[in-house]
Image (tube, coloured by chain):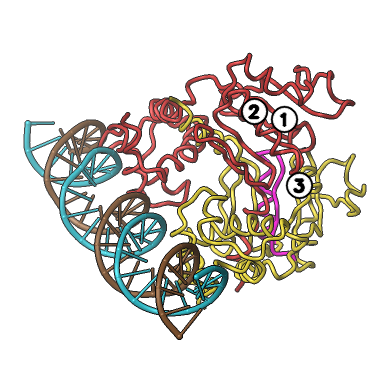
Chain colours: A yellow, B red, C brown, D cyan
DNA sequence: ATCAGTTTTTGAATTCAGTCACAAAACTTG
DNA sequence: CAAGTTTTGTGACTGAATTCAAAAACTGAT
């Protein structure tokens, strides 16, 4: 596994680069230099060069980086060249927002199973998928090959949902409920919490 | 400004501590030790002590930290003891989710102005606030004392909205559109991007 | 072909964050 | 009040990430 050598901070920046490179490509540029890219993401060019150097030699000196192969390589490193199916739990405001979210990295993410516990919604179709009862989470997930679950339910219910997802054999969770989930070692949790983001912002905003 | 000495990683963790401490307080605990808190957030206790030590001596040795004063102090450091009013642009799925988001740090965040460009929605009331036309953003924001704007519109429109917010005199933006906004120096942008989070996750999920 | 101008590559130097380990402090118990 | 226990606070250490700078490689022009 060569991966282990790539610093985690670098990995965290890759999706950011990817987003910029895709836009660059759309604009028709074939190459980009580290300092151009650095400008676009408000960083130092040296950091970008170092980051990219961790997984091979991409640039040609005097010219810059070829956009297309660079995109392909980053997607490969992040495993975005594979197809990922998702289970979504909770079709409230957040859940619906996710379902209608347009740019899921060029279709490599797809919602496969959708759950809710509202009898009004269960059985209906949303985005062409039938909504299942939340009590069936572990069963249905187990039968599928889904590796990622997304939790978009009220706080109190998040614990139980996480538990069911884990029992269904999930290996990654994205949790929109602002509570801390205690999961076994093999299961990675990503917490997305608006008030946390807001707090980081207010710290910096006072003159 | 003493702030400058606090490592940014520490600041990033404060909201996390805050969330846990609030829950601890609800459970009726008056004090908490660094190792108890460490367990709750899956970290080493030393890191927590170090973090807290950056802004004063809080704990009493042999006992731990008093929860209430600690919460108060963290809220103060993050400037959460002040009232923050927000401008929300875009009342689609994401926008609605935000409006109905319950725990905005004990009411220190409040949506004051709401905008959209859909004639069907403009003029209507949502959460007790009238929805204004997006073309009025810079004017209305300028007249208000709002410092934070939230962008929850489709990608292409995000640039223009950001521009208007900046002209309205905003100093922080939270952007849910997965595009990079180029703002003047005084304006801080926080990017929230689901596919970025997902990508960080997929990197780690392959055996 | 050579030179000037760019821009990557890469190891070294620096800065920053995290861990460790222990002294000092406060509380508890007899 | 003294001995024992717990837990903080912190300086020294270790390791990771970032920046720096010298060397190498490409382009285009003369």
| Mark 2 Cα-neighbour bin, 10 Å: few <14, some 14–19, many ≥20 | many
Vertically, is A38 above or below B6? Answer: below
Secondary structure beneath label 2: helix
Vertically, is A196 above or below A189? Answer: above
- Residue under the image location 62 percent in, 42 percent down: B181
Tell me where the magenta segment starts and ends, as one range.
Answer: A146-167
What chain letter is assigned to the residue under label 3?
Answer: A
Residue A162's spot in the image, x, y percent?
Answer: 66, 52
Residue A121's spot in the image, x, y percent?
Answer: 88, 42
Q: Which residue is mark 3?
A: A98
Viewer-proximal residue among A158 and B49: B49
Give the CA distance from mark 1 to mark 3.
18 Å
Q: Does the residue at mark 1 contact the one at mark 2 (Cβ under 8 Å)?
A: yes
- Residue under the image location 77 percent in, 20 percent down: B132
Give the CA distance from mark 2 to mark 3.
25 Å
Viewer-proximal residue among A44 and A134: A44
User: Which quadrant would the C terminus of chain A be assigned to in this image?
Assistant: top left
Q: Which residue is mark 2?
A: B165
- Is B114 left or right of A42, judged from the image as shown? right
Q: Of tags 1 and 3, which is closer to the observer?
A: 1
Q: Earlier along the polypeptide chain: callout 1 or callout 2?
A: 1
- Quadrant of the image occupied by residue A179: top right
- Is B66 left or right of A169, judged from the image as shown? left
Q: Of tags 1 and 2, which is closer to the observer?
A: 2
- Is A18 left or right of A51, judged from the image as shown? right
What chain letter is assigned to the residue under label 2?
Answer: B
Q: Of tags 2 and 3, which is closer to the observer?
A: 2
Image disc number at residue B89: 1
Secondary structure beneath label 1: strand
């Amino acid at each position: 596994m060569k991966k282990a050598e790539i610093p985690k901070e670098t990995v965290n920046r890759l999706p950011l680069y990817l987003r910029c490179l895709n836009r660059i490509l759309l604009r028709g540029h074939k190459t980009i230099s580290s300092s151009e890219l650095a400008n676009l993401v408000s960083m130092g060019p040296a950091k970008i060069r170092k980051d990219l150097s961790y997984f091979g030699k991409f640039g040609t000196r005097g010219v810059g980086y070829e956009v297309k192969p660079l995109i392909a390589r980053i997607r490969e490193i992040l495993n975005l060249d594979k197809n990922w199916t998702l289970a979504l739990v909770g079709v409230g405001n957040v859940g619906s927002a996710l379902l209608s979210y347009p740019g899921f990295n060029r279709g490599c993410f797809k919602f496969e199973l959708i759950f809710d516990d509202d009898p009004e919604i269960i059985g209906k179709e949303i985005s062409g998928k039938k909504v299942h009862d939340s009590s069936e989470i572990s069963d249905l997930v187990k039968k599928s090959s889904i590796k990622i679950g997304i939790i978009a339910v009220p706080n109190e219910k998040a614990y139980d949902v996480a538990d069911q997802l884990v029992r269904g054999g999930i290996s990654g969770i994205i949790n929109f409920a602002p509570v801390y989930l205690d999961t076994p070692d093999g299961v990675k949790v990503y917490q997305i919490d608006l008030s946390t983001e807001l707090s980081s912002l207010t710290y910096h905003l006072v003159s």
